[in-house]
Image (tube, rainbow, N blue to C red):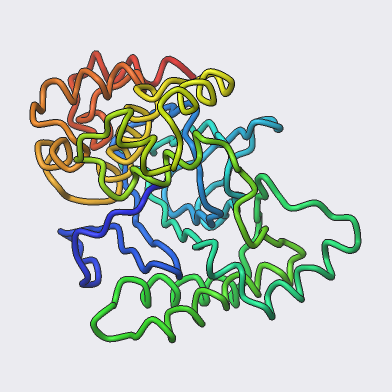
């Protein structure tokens, strides 16, 4: 999930946003109008996903499929690629709330001290964990953290930080801890982080190389060694951000296309469908019956 903050007010039933607090976290209310399978989505930061309607199934790079029903939650570690299936009810939407933890927040000294005790018991950090029964304490802390992140005008960053930290401490009570800083030192990771805040810019190879203090030749060699091209990274980062905005905001598709660097909505739609296998309008359940049927049949 990438950061984008088109507004600071709390969500209303008719308007939804992705709310970002640098150094603290991100919250989003995701809605999807039909069942879709989303493959190879990059999750850069640790997150907790609380399912409210429908079913969420995930598969990490090192695991098998797991699913969460309403009232259950997933906790995901950062720096991994995950497959998702978001399934809807017969007459409704898929809905979930995301809370994404900023790596700076997870570097809190007291949190690191407590999580180190769990690590000392030889329990590795998670890639994905299903919480089959979300405690009242955790659910309440999750709600307060989301409200704080969405209420920038009313709640200062210092308070929002403590509310998000409360969530990770309740997770610790369940033996779930998250690494405090990114472990991915690849050029691909650095490029995604570099461009994610300015996806509508013209990111050329010479500009990216200069920003990373590399020569173009070194940049190319490093990317070849990682099995990816700069063009592929740009497209994938833009499309992943667009998917989040389609799910978690009420922005028109044309505005989302512009925000991720596409002046032509039709060209954006072609790129999006090539990446995910379904059109942008399918995410909100506005697609033609044939396309909706196709997205369900790929499970």
Is 276 displayed left or right of 298 in the figure?
left
Q: Nearer the viewer, residue 187 or 36?
A: 187
Classify residue 179 by image quadrant.
bottom right
Residue 185 placement (x, y as % from top left):
60, 42
Give the image location of residue 266, x and y in percent: 11, 22
Is 221 in front, or is 45?
221
* Residue found 61% across the figure and 69% down from its top: 107
Residue 186, above or below 95: above
133 left or right, relative to 249: right
In the image, taking residue 49 as reference, residue 205 lies left or right, namely: left
> Residue 106's x, y, as percent?
60, 67
- Report whether 69 appears left or right of 118: left
Find the residue positioned furthest to the right: 121
Q: Residue at x 49, y 37 (%)?
A: 42
Q: Nearer the viewer, residue 109 or 224?
A: 224
Above or below, 291 against 76 in this view is above
In percent of the image, x 27 and y 86: which residue is there?
Answer: 154
């Amino acid at each position: 999930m990438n950061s984008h903050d088109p507004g600071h007010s709390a969500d209303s039933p008719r308007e939804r946003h992705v709310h970002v607090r640098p150094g603290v976290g991100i919250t989003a209310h995701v809605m999807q109008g039909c069942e879709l399978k989303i493959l190879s989505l990059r999750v850069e930061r640790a997150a907790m996903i609380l399912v409210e309607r429908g079913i969420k199934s995930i598969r990490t790079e090192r695991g098998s499929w797991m699913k969460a029903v309403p009232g259950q939650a997933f906790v995901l570690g950062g720096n991994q690629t995950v497959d998702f299936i978001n399934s809807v009810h017969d007459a409704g939407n898929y809905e979930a709330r995301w809370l994404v933890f900023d790596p700076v927040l997870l570097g809190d000294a007291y949190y690191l001290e407590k999580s180190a005790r769990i690590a000392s018991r030889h329990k590795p950090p998670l890639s994905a964990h299903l919480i089959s029964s979300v405690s009242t304490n955790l659910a309440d802390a999750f709600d307060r953290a989301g409200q704080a992140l969405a209420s920038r005008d009313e709640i200062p960053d210092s308070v929002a930080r403590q509310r998000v930290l409360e969530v990770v401490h309740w997770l610790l009570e369940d033996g779930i801890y998250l690494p405090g800083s990114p472990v991915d030192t690849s050029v691909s990771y650095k490029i995604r982080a570099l461009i994610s805040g300015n996806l509508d810019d013209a990111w050329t190879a010479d500009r990216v190389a200069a920003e990373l203090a590399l020569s173009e030749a070194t940049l190319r060699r490093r990317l070849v060694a990682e099995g990816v091209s700069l063009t592929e990274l740009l497209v994938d980062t833009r499309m992943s951000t667009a998917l989040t905005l389609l799910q978690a905001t009420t922005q028109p598709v044309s505005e989302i296309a512009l925000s991720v660097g596409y002046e032509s909505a039709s060209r954006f739609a072609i790129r999006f469908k090539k990446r995910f296998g379904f059109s942008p309008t399918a995410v909100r359940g506005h697609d033609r019956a044939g396309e909706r049927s196709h997205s369900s049949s790929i499970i």
